[in-house]
Image: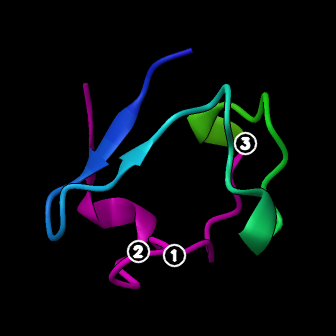
């Protein structure tokens, strides 16, 4: 599973860690992150992320 980086603030979404504080369990692939999920740092949508 690949990491994705927010182009606004530089936050890295790591699928091994997920974002449990915002409802995304560890082990969740980027493709399975809900479309309405937002960056926990700056609030940007998934479209602001690029694959690393």
Place of residue 47 in the rendered image (x, y in percent of width and height, measured from the top left): 33, 63
Kindly identify which residue carries mark 3: 32
Give the residue furthest to the top.
Answer: 1
* Residue in view at x 71 percent, y 62 percent: 34
Distance of label 1 from label 3 (alpha carbons): 13 Å
Instruction: Pick the quarter of the image with the N terminus.
Output: top right
Q: Secondary structure at mark 1?
A: loop
Determine contact: label 2, label 1, CB under 8 Å.
Answer: yes
* Residue in view at x 76 percent, y 69 percent: 21
Give the residue furthest to the bottom.
Answer: 43
Q: Residues within 10 Å of mark 2 (few under 14, many from 20)?
A: some
| Residue 11: quarter of image | bottom left
Distance of label 2 from label 1 (alpha carbons): 5 Å
* Residue in view at x 18 percent, y 68 percent: 9
Q: Residues within 10 Å of mark 3 (few under 14, many from 20)?
A: few
The magenta span reads 33-52
Kindly identify which residue carries mark 1: 38
Say above or below: 9 vs 3. below
Say above or below: 27 vs 44. above
């Amino acid at each position: 599973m690949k990491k994705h980086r927010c182009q606004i603030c530089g936050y890295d979404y790591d699928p091994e860690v997920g974002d449990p504080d915002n409802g995304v369990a560890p082990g969740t692939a980027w493709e399975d992150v809900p479309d309405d999920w937002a960056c926990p740092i700056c609030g940007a949508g998934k479209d602001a992320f690029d694959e690393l």
